Image: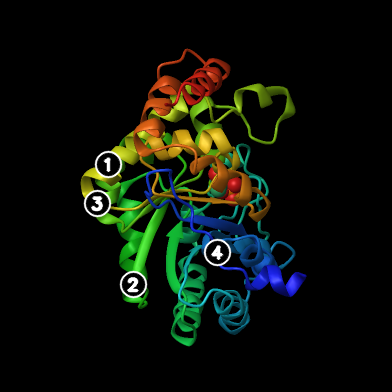
Amino acid sequence: ERAARAAAPITPGALADGTSVPLLANLGSADGAANAVELGAEGVGLFRTEFLFLDADRAPSVREQQEQYTRMLSAFPGRKVVVRVLDAGADKPLSFLNDAEEENPALGLRGIRALRHAEVILREQLTALAAADAATDADLWVMAPMIATVDETRYFTDLCRELGLKTAGVMVETPSAALIADRVLGVADFASIGTNDLTQYTMAADRLLGTVANLQDPWAPAVLRLVAEVGAAGGRLGKPVGICGEAAADPLLAVVLVGLGATTLSMSPSALADVRASLARYTREDAERIARAALAAEGAAEAKQAAKQAAESAP
Ligand code: PEP
Ligand code: MG
């Protein structure tokens, strides 16, 4: 039965009018790849490389990394795989990259900032990725976490090109990057919105802290407006805008995100089936109307309710 399911063709994500919305997997190791394919992932939208190295007390060698990346890319021949370079710091500290003494690690030297500070580690990672890319048939896209400025975007994309990586993009997970998405996307090949951190930084609410968990809600209209900003910039410039935060796994919010201009959605593989079924119920026009209803609401709960009502009144 397992073999029969694995052999079944993937139904691509699409709206009711046929608009394609590729549905991709969030992965933290190559071990999850087979399961993701089995559950219908059309590729990988976020490969979190830091999980390979959480217990390491030194930076992994180029050879070690190359092995891991080759194993993962081999599971997706001909498919898009978006690999994020190390997002070290805050909720994902790496002892060889981060200073444990920072008072506000979420606002500190994390993500691209930490990598720029220790550029040799970034160079080695990109070198390993380029080698794995050359050895496999996947369509490798590489992106940087925690981008806040155009300067950081240019720094990263220049380095990717220097090291032979074709497609270089950024995560949009700070309000700054979202507000200047037109300029960021003028430099980067694509954007992928990390709604977990984008919500944390927009609402100024620690994503790990239970006492402010009510604020960590991607339905917040402030977060939706920022997503809309990025979607519109991507549309104007003809650049892909993915979503790779948890928000993409909510079947109704997924429709809203597409209505705001997201072109792909990436999520934990277990969420793929429900999101695929939900997208198939609405046309692009419906999705845009549902998104407008959510955007116009006063708060997160109201936005969800408004989207629900708009979805139910879909013709
Ligand atoms: C995000 O911030 O939404 C994201 C996808 O990245 P992570 O959860 O790994 O920080
Ligand atoms: Mg993040």
- Residue receiving disc 2: 166
**Which residue appears at 24% of the width and 51% of the height?**
238
Q: Under tag 2, what secondary structure? A: loop
**Camera-side residue of 82 and 201:** 82
Query: Could you tell me how far apart the alpha carbons at marks 4 and 3 are, in whole angstroms?
Result: 26 Å
Query: Could you tell me how far apart the alpha carbons at marks 2 and 1 are, in whole angstroms?
Result: 22 Å
Furthest-front residue in view?
315
**Which residue appears at 47% of the width and 48% of the height?**
146
Q: Depth-wise, is mark 3 or mark 2 nearer the camera?
A: 3
Query: Could you tell me how far apart the alpha carbons at marks 3 and 2 are, in whole angstroms?
Result: 17 Å
The reply to whether the C-beta atoms of the residues labelled 2 and 1 are less than 8 Å apart is no
Quarter in which the C terminus is drawn: top left
Q: Earlier in the sequence, mark 1 or mark 3?
A: 1
Query: Could you tell me how far apart the alpha carbons at marks 1 and 3 are, in whole angstroms?
Result: 8 Å
Query: Could you tell me how far apart the alpha carbons at marks 1 and 4 are, in whole angstroms?
Result: 30 Å
- Residue receiving disc 1: 233
Q: Earlier in the sequence, mark 4 or mark 2?
A: 4
Mark 2: few, some, or many residues within 10 Å (few <14, many ≥20)?
some
The reply to whether the C-beta atoms of the residues labelled 4 and 2 are less than 8 Å apart is no
- Residue receiving disc 3: 238
Q: Earlier in the sequence, mark 1 or mark 4?
A: 4
